[in-house]
Image (cartoon, coloured by chain):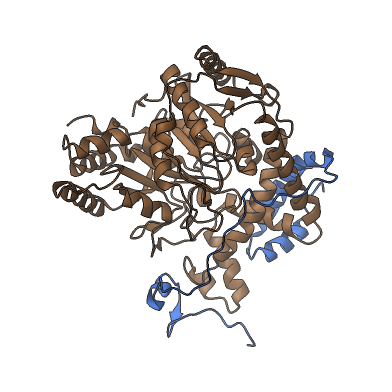
């Protein structure tokens, strides 16, 4: 894809939850087009039958899912920008 | 005792245990040097001198009682500000964390403290470890101790500068595409990225979870070996940490490079600065004279590593960084707080809190994962990642380690590459393949070009850190560049 249009960029920014300014949108659209142009070199490779690699581990080892009490509610809320009655407070989500 | 800030970790611990000096004296010497010199470097983002002094006193008290405080008794260390240290703010070099008050120690910190190490403070870095020059920090750049007009490299720029400038005997960094090795090369110190899974990532703020590893920056391979022996090992809090036995890496250092088979991928080394190439070639010749066998190898897919990396790493980053939303911690600006919808609050918070490079990578990562583009970009990159890993497997059939320059050039000037993101990305051309494959990499100082340090990188098979450190230790002795002190 040769060019990332501003419209597509705006869609991506919405997915990424970034309220970009118009200037940021234009500049990022330009950068993305440049980076994807560079990444187009991968299109020349024959990848028939090559499996994708998502990690380099020898296998994950899960621990038993047992509850622990590492943080008190007060500690968990200590860094919250807004809280009320022991809960994180956010703008209204449903209705309104 | 004088010269404390230039001593190695093992040397310091031994001197403290032998009561030739004390942990308190060692910590004070480092704190004074930081107070005197860091204004011109900018390595530290936060310090807790009182805690460091109290911890040092405790080490001295334990020694006085006849106890053994551990292998790193009284050794002063500093930590890249992407790793949690209880009691110190974590910033990740970003405004969006709003000086997060950390409620716990990362596993590596717990292990280092249990071994007697003293944490002096947190070090500057590119925001969320995204960058190759430390210029992406929200708290200003770090300057290279060898030349204050130049970058220290990144993203662990503060870590490399702090160890080079003798502010700490060791610093922890994190390496997703070269962020330990590249700044180590630029600042003339040793930098080790362990095998993926060798060191627990619990308490490391995630950038790209399939690539991130914590590792040490030190002034010798012996100190890197000692550090790795302490921080490595399985951890119940990191499902990807390996159960393999942790070796005594120091015991494996050996005396020479005799019998080592060192692979050199000549075709991959195009476009390297002439001064860097000259030091690299001298090093290879010296290793050969020392008894190493030099083997021609090929890494045919390595030239595709940067493109692959920027598709894979940004995809993972866009997912990992979704947690910074102004709800449970971090920034919520007045403008964001005034929004009547949750979505707008998220968007405003993230636009105000993230810097330009982080936004660029979140956008790229979101794009490559989005409907209609996933197969063409992300999935394709994951397949190329397999080819890159296979290249290493093939190469290691005929050699024990692979040698390349760590970077294509020595440290560049502040501002030199900030206008062109792609040019900045190419600073990591030789370091990125190891992260994609999961294999360990070690940068060792091997000489100077126009007064600037040059690093040589060894890459080894999975979990063969001992072999890398042996090669690095031999190179240090042969080239004598490791202990060099910058003019600062």
Q: Quadrant of the C terminus of chain A?
A: bottom right
Any part of residue B32 in sight: yes
User: At 57% across and 67% down in the image, what residue appears?
Assistant: B348
- The answer to whether residue B93 is left or right of residue B67 is right
User: At 29% across and 48% down in the image, what residue appears?
Assistant: B116
Q: Nearer the viewer, residue B381 or A13?
A: B381
- Relative to A9, say whether B298 is above or below: above
For the view shown, which residue lies furthest in the left direction? B64
Quadrant of res A21: bottom right
Residue B147 at x, y percent in the picture: 42, 28
User: At 58% across and 26% down in the image, what residue appears?
Assistant: B403
Residue B314 at x, y percent in the picture: 65, 52
- The answer to whether residue B335 is left or right of residue B481 is right
| Tally of numbered discs | 0
Q: Nearer the viewer, residue A93 or B213?
A: B213
Q: Nearer the viewer, residue B63 or B286?
A: B63
**In the figure, the brown chain has which letter?**
B
Residue A58 at x, y percent in the picture: 62, 50
For the view shown, which residue lies furthest in the top direction? B289
User: At 61% across and 51% down in the image, what residue appears?
Assistant: B210
Residue B488 at x, y percent in the picture: 33, 29
For the view shown, which residue lies furthest in the bottom direction? A95
- Relative to B412, say whether B333 is above or below: below
Look at the image and give the colour of chain A: blue
Q: Nearer the viewer, residue A58 or B96?
A: A58
- The answer to whether residue B29 is left or right of residue B180 is left
Any part of residue B148 in sight: no
């Amino acid at each position: 894809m040769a060019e990332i249009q501003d419209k597509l960029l705006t869609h991506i920014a919405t997915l990424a939850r970034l309220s970009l300014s118009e200037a940021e949108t234009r500049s990022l659209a330009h950068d993305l087009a440049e980076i994807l142009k560079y990444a187009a070199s991968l299109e020349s490779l024959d990848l028939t039958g090559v499996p994708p690699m998502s990690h380099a581990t020898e296998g994950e080892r899960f621990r038993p899912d047992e509850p622990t009490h590492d943080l008190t509610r007060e500690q968990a809320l200590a860094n919250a920008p807004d809280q009320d009655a022991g809960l994180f407070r956010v703008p209204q989500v449903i209705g309104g | 005792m004088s010269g404390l800030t230039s001593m190695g970790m093992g040397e310091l611990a031994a001197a403290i245990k032998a009561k030739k000096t004390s942990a308190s004296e060692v910590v004070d010497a480092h704190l004074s040097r930081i107070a005197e010199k860091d204004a011109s470097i900018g390595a530290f983002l936060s310090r807790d001198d009182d805690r460091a002094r109290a911890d040092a006193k405790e080490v001295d008290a334990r020694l006085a009682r006849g106890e053994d405080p551990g292998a790193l008794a009284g050794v002063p260390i500093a930590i890249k500000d992407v790793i949690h240290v209880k009691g110190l703010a974590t910033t990740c070099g970003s405004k969006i964390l709003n000086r997060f008050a950390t409620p716990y120690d990362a596993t590596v910190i717990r292990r280092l403290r249990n071994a007697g190490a003293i944490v002096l403070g947190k070090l500057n870095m590119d925001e969320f470890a995204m960058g190759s020059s430390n210029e992406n920090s929200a708290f200003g750049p770090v300057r290279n101790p060898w030349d204050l007009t130049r970058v220290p490299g990144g993203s662990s720029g503060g870590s490399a500068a702090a160890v080079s400038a003798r502010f700490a005997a060791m610093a922890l960094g994190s390496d997703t595409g070269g962020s330990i090795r590249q700044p180590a090369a630029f600042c003339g110190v040793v930098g080790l990225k362990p095998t993926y899974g060798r060191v627990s990532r619990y308490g490391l703020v995630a950038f790209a979870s399939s690539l991130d590893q914590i590792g040490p920056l030190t002034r010798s391979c012996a100190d890197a070996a000692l550090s790795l022996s302490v921080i490595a090992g399985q951890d119940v809090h990191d499902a990807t940490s390996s159960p393999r036995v942790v070796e005594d890496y120091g015991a494996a250092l050996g005396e020479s490079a005799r019998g080592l088979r060192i692979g050199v991928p000549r075709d991959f080394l195009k476009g390297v600065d002439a001064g860097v190439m000259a030091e690299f070639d001298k090093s290879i010749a010296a290793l050969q004279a020392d008894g190493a066998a030099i083997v021609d190898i090929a890494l045919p897919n390595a030239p595709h590593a940067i493109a692959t990396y920027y598709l894979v790493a940004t995809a993972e980053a866009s997912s990992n960084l979704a947690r910074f939303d102004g709800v449970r911690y971090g920034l919520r600006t007045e403008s964001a707080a005034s929004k009547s919808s949750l979505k707008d609050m998220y968007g405003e918070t993230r636009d105000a809190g993230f810097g330009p490079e982080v936004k660029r990578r979140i956008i790229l990562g979101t794009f490559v994962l989005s409907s209609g583009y996933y197969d063409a970009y992300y999935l394709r990159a994951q397949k190329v990642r397999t080819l890159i890993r296979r290249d290493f497997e093939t190469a290691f059939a005929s050699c024990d380690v692979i040698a390349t320059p760590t970077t294509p050039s020595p440290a560049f000037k502040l501002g030199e590459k900030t206008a062109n993101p792609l040019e900045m990305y190419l600073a990591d051309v030789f370091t990125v393949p190891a992260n994609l494959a999961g294999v360990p990499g070690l940068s060792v100082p091997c000489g100077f070009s126009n007064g600037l340090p040059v690093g040589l990188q060894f890459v080894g098979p999975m979990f063969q850190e001992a072999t890398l450190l042996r090669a690095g230790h031999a190179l240090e002795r042969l080239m004598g560049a490791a202990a060099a002190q910058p003019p600062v």
